[in-house]
Image (cartoon, rainbow, N blue to C red):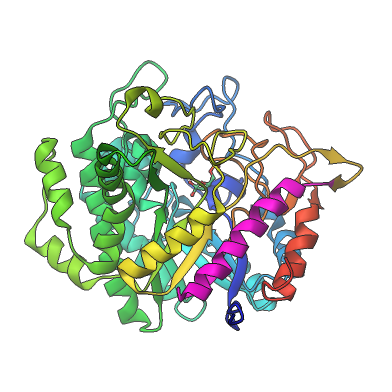
């Protein structure tokens, strides 16, 4: 028996956050309103909604105060440094820099905030990993022309990129242009990921899915990502860009060939399409056929395709929370209550929110994507959403430790398989607002924040048991689990 390969020296260990889910300070220092700022809180039974009028007395908007990273970033970064992070994933809130998205000059105060965050990271030798777009579309662009559904959005986004690349030329090396870009391949990702508002009711957006707009929006994000890569490499050839795919790994529920075919279709559409565009630089054959079969059409120019071909990313990153089963039998397909769809896998348990826990699926996925793309890989999100109990300043989150331990074990096996895995930034460094529920009690962090679903709490930070455990893992470069 040969010895299992170890995590390579210099492996990136850290955690992930997103501006709209942790910063708060939604209208401070010149910040404009983003689509996330007009989303009400929800629950896993009642979906979040986008309001048209911000009337604070009627609704609770979780992103407005959130966990106040904006004012507490020093304390939070110090805690991450204590765990031993050498990488810190975060996003830059577009509306801090361009409040309405369409200004010609950036808001200096917004940039100064990120200057300070980067200075703090540098103090602890933490590499910033920056998501440029994490559901933070300026609301103005949505009102003006339906957000990403319109080509005009690209120019405004690229101006935003230009400002960031120039300002942070020597500060940031790793960039992710779009978070979970592939969510637009399903109707769930419409509003949340692209600011497309279809149809209005009195106070709310009706959220009617329009696949033409949705896939046009996705296309505009692909072209913008490729243009950002080309622009960024001119500004600093050492910049490294990555895709970020919400990878919901799919298995056929049975060996019925009908299940196999459906599973393949689902995998290609949801998981592979966006990676193929961003890493291989091609619009794959199967998506052209999918568009034809479903009557989907929008403008794709020759120039777009040329840009996509040239502006490929350097690394592949993805979020991995679960796997799902696909079944051609309607009844089985309905069994799971999981918001992400799919049938229940009898071999797996699930989180309270019905996300099926599948550590071995991570090893399978790592091999699958490395074989397909052959570029360095980072797992930029993975974690367990759970209700934590706070007792005398302690949080005993053994369940989270188990979840992350098992996933790290599988990452190590994938490395042993030969996969070039370079980093791991689990969700989340710190408790923050959940994107699907808008609530606080679906917690992911290593650091507990005293705040509840209604927004009450001291905002004080506490180290969970998982904090101490993860510190040991990082200190041993993944050897002590
Ligand atoms: C991903 C998002 C994150 C994050 C995470 C957990 O889809 O990129 O922003 O929130 O999922 O999801 P949730 O908060 O819905 O549990």
Identify the residue at the far top of this view.
202
Q: Position of residue 5 (x, y in %)?
A: 58, 79
Q: Position of residue 367 (x, y in %)?
A: 42, 65
* Numbered label tally: 0
Q: Position of residue 223 (x, y in %)?
A: 23, 60
Q: Nearer the viewer, residue 148 or 409?
A: 409
Q: Nearer the viewer, residue 266 or 326?
A: 326
Quadrant location of residue 327?
Answer: top left
Quadrant location of residue 15?
Answer: bottom right
Q: Which residue does the image show at 52% across and 36% down from the upper left?
A: 346
Would you place residue 339 above or below residue 310 in this image? above
Left or right, 333 with reference to 283? right
* 103 in magenta: no
What range is drawn magenta here? 395-424
Would you place residue 201 above or below residue 253 in this image? above
Q: Nearer the viewer, residue 440 or 245?
A: 245
Q: Main secondary structure of the magenta part?
A: helix
Q: Which residue does the image show at 68% across and 59% down from the upper left?
A: 73
Would you place residue 341 above or below residue 27 in this image? above
């Amino acid at each position: 028996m040969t010895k299992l390969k170890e995590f390579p020296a210099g492996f990136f260990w850290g955690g992930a956050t997103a501006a709209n889910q942790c910063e708060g300070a939604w209208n401070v220092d010149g910040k404009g309103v983003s689509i996330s700022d007009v989303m009400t809180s929800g629950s896993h039974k009642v979906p979040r909604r986008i309001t048209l009028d911000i009337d604070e007395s009627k609704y609770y908007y979780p992103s407005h105060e959130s966990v106040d990273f904006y004012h507490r970033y020093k304390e939070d970064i110090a805690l991450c440094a204590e765990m031993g992070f050498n990488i810190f994933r975060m996003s830059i809130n577009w509306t801090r820099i361009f409040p309405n998205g369409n200004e010609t000059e950036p808001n200096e105060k917004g940039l100064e905030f990120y200057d300070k965050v980067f200075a703090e990271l540098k103090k602890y030798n933490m590499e910033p990993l920056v998501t440029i777009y994490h559901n933070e579309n300026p609301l103005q662009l949505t009102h003006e022309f339906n957000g990403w559904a319109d080509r005009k959005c690209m120019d405004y986004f690229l101006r935003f990129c230009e400002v960031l690349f120039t300002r942070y030329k020597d500060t940031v090396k790793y960039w992710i242009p779009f978070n979970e870009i592939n969510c637009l391949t399903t109707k769930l990702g419409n509003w949340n990921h692209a600011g497309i508002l279809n149809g209005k009711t009195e106070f709310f957006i009706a959220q009617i899915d329009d696949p033409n707009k949705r896939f046009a929006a996705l296309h505009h994000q692909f072209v913008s990502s490729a243009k950002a890569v080309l622009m960024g490499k001119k500004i600093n050839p050492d910049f490294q860009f990555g895709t970020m795919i919400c990878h919901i790994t799919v298995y056929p529920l049975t060996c019925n060939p009908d299940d196999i075919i459906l599973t393949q279709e689902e995998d290609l559409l949801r998981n592979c399409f966006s990676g193929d565009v961003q890493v291989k630089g091609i619009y794959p054959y199967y998506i052209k056929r999918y568009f034809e079969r479903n009557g989907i059409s929008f403008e794709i120019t020759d120039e777009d395709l040329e840009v996509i071909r040239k502006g490929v990313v350097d690394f592949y990153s993805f979020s991995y929370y679960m796997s799902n089963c696909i079944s051609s039998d309607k009844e089985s397909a309905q069994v799971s209550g999981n918001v992400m769809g799919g049938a229940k896998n009898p071999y797996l348990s699930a989180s309270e929110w019905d996300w099926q826990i599948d550590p071995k699926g991570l090893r399978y996925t790592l091999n699958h994507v490395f074989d397909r793309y052959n570029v360095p890989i980072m797992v930029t999100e993975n974690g367990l959403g759970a209700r934590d109990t706070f007792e005398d300043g302690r949080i005993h989150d053994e369940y989270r430790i188990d979840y992350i331990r098992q996933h790290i074990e599988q990452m190590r096996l994938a490395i042993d398989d030969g996969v070039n895995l370079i980093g791991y930034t689990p969700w989340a460094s710190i408790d923050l607002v959940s994107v699907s529920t808008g609530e606080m009690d679906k917690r992911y962090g290593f650091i507990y924040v005293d705040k509840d679903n209604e927004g009450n709490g001291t905002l004080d930070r506490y180290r969970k048991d998982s904090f101490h455990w993860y510190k040991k893992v990082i200190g041993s470069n993944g050897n002590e689990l």
